[in-house]
Amino acid sequence: MKKLLLATVTGAAIASGAYVVSQQEKGYTSLPQLDYVPADSIFFWSQLESLPYLSYLDVLPEAFKNTYQVNVFMEEMKAQEAELDKSALFFLNLVEQYAKSLESSTSFANIWGADNELKMLAYSVGLLPVMRAELGNVNAFQKTLTEAADKAGIAYQQSDVDGIPVTKFTIDHEGQKVFDLVLSVQGKWVTLTADTPFNSPEDLQVALAITKPVNSLSSTGKVERYIKDYQLDGASLGYLDNKLLVDALTAKDPQSSTTKMLDNILALSGSPNALDMVRNEACQKDFSDMANKWPAVISGTKSFDISANQANFEVSTIVASTDQKILTAISNLRGFVPAHTQNADKGLVTFGLGLNAAQLSPTVNTIWAAFSSAEFSCQPLLMAQAQSKETNPAMLAMATGMLGSMQGVSFSIFDIDIAEKADQPGAVELSKLDGLATISANDATALFNMAKSFSPEFSSINLPEDGTPVEVNDFLPPDYQLDKPLYFALKGQHIALYTGEEAEKHANALASQAVEANGMITFGLDTKQLVPLIEKGSKLAGEEVPEELHNLFGDGYQMHMVFDANNQGLTTDVKINIKKGS
């Protein structure tokens, strides 16, 4: 069983490594292949518009290719190669080919047959995973799979399904067949799926895009609706359908392909009654009601621009919800994030947390009360509800009361440099710092005075109402002295602690920024500035540059992330700018 698990994990690594995003296109044109995707697919991921993937791969830094993680995985598996069976070796060979393909766009094209017109789909037919791709050279893809099979010594054969030629790779464990990995080619489209003991011949025909499902995704309008509702560009889209997942687990529709396959898996495992606790009318209703309020997780591109020298893209992920009571409670937590934290080009690193401290306890109480007072009939939910009632979050009000009128905090480093200590060779100290930390509040003065009561050493500091800064270098510990002045200042509704010219500029700009609910979390990072700094520090300390540095950051990129809540759900937007050779 351990060897079978290794094979499964290896196969999953191939799928998780295929990180693909899309280019920006105007409008959305339905892809004909959506006619072959069942309407009840639990998950769906797609590259609906052609992606110049080879050009993108040439720009992509090593950090985004996951090559380090893949290579570490390969080393660990090869160390156990003698213990692996043929099927595990087959998947390991494919992982090895995937790692090689990331070395260059030429290698990727030669190994997988992709070109700059790549389209891809991944979805489920019941519980059968399906991957489909439009390739420039389908023979290259076939060759990679058959050579991996030959090297591992697993059997494969040419066959047909309803008259369509296929190649079946037999995946076994301890001499017993587990399933067939099935590859078919129709024109420029390759399809990879599985034929298992728990699916029917009809399921396989749908998975291979030989026959269309009774109800297709294209007939539902779901793709178009998601693109419109969440302002996506229509080039790339994925989702996890929570409603369909819950309905399958509770067998709300016993005739659905997913439920039938799950029943077959339970029977084959010798535990046909494993889900009986939730497979009753009460649980079907209760879980379905909950899923209807949080129906899906949707992700897609808002924009994508690729050239020979750079790639810019914005990806949005939405935890969709119709539970307005909970969303309102969470939205009430929104606080203030300063303007300088809302862009990726404002410094080395920037972070903003918008938090209405006064709403923290009411929000937790609202969420707790919503669950603890819900009318459930399902026994597992009733048990969870009873446990929740034993933990009353009312005490949180006392802890958050000390935060007073706080609406947000932020921290930014605009510039920084280091040097070797003159009296300690090999020791590193800050030679330059340009940074700003802020606290925003409805009554910043009162909050500052309350904070001073917990730190008697600051009791002598008084912040002028007109924004005049107070130098506080004398309060710094001996080992953390700065050559430039460090200032405390009251800038309107904001308390600012800063040093450096850029930080002073943004601190002064706070005076005109009214504290209002404009966000929850922002985070920006410019690794083009960070990587050279870490390299310099390593050199000054006489140490080698950490291998993980380039594995994590590559040659440098700019990234900015925003997490927020609105009446559609919880959203995360990520913008990334990558420049070749930067």
Image (spheres, rainbow, N blue to C red):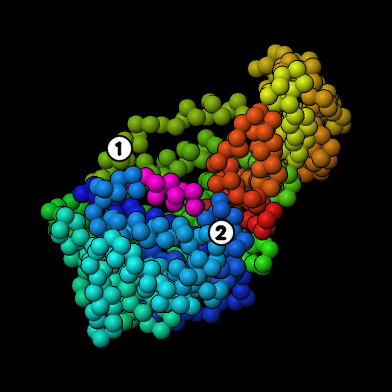
Query: Which three-letter amino acid code belongs to the residue tagged 2?
Result: Ser
Q: Position of residue 77 (x, y in %)?
A: 34, 48
| Residue in the picture at 25% in, 47% down | 83
Q: Can you see residue 335?
A: no
| Residue in the picture at 59% in, 46% down | 550
Query: How dense is the environment of label 1, judged by Cα within 10 Å: few (below 14), some, or many (20 and up)?
Result: few
Circle 2 sits on which residue? 316
Identify the element where label 2 is drawn: strand
Disc number lying in front (1 or 2): 2
Q: Position of residue 515 (x, y in %)?
A: 72, 42
The image shows residue 464, relative to residue 48, as above or below, that is above
Q: Which residues are magenta?
A: 67-77
| Residue in the picture at 42% in, 41% down | 369
Residue 386: which disc? 1
Q: Is residue 382 a member of the stretch shown in magenta?
A: no
The image shows residue 454, relative to residue 331, as above or below, that is above
Query: Which three-letter amino acid code belongs to the residue tagged 1?
Result: Ala
Nearest the camera: 457 or 578? 578
Image-based side of 546 in relation to 3, left or right? right
Q: Position of residue 378 (x, y in %)?
A: 25, 49
| Residue in the picture at 63% in, 40% down | 353
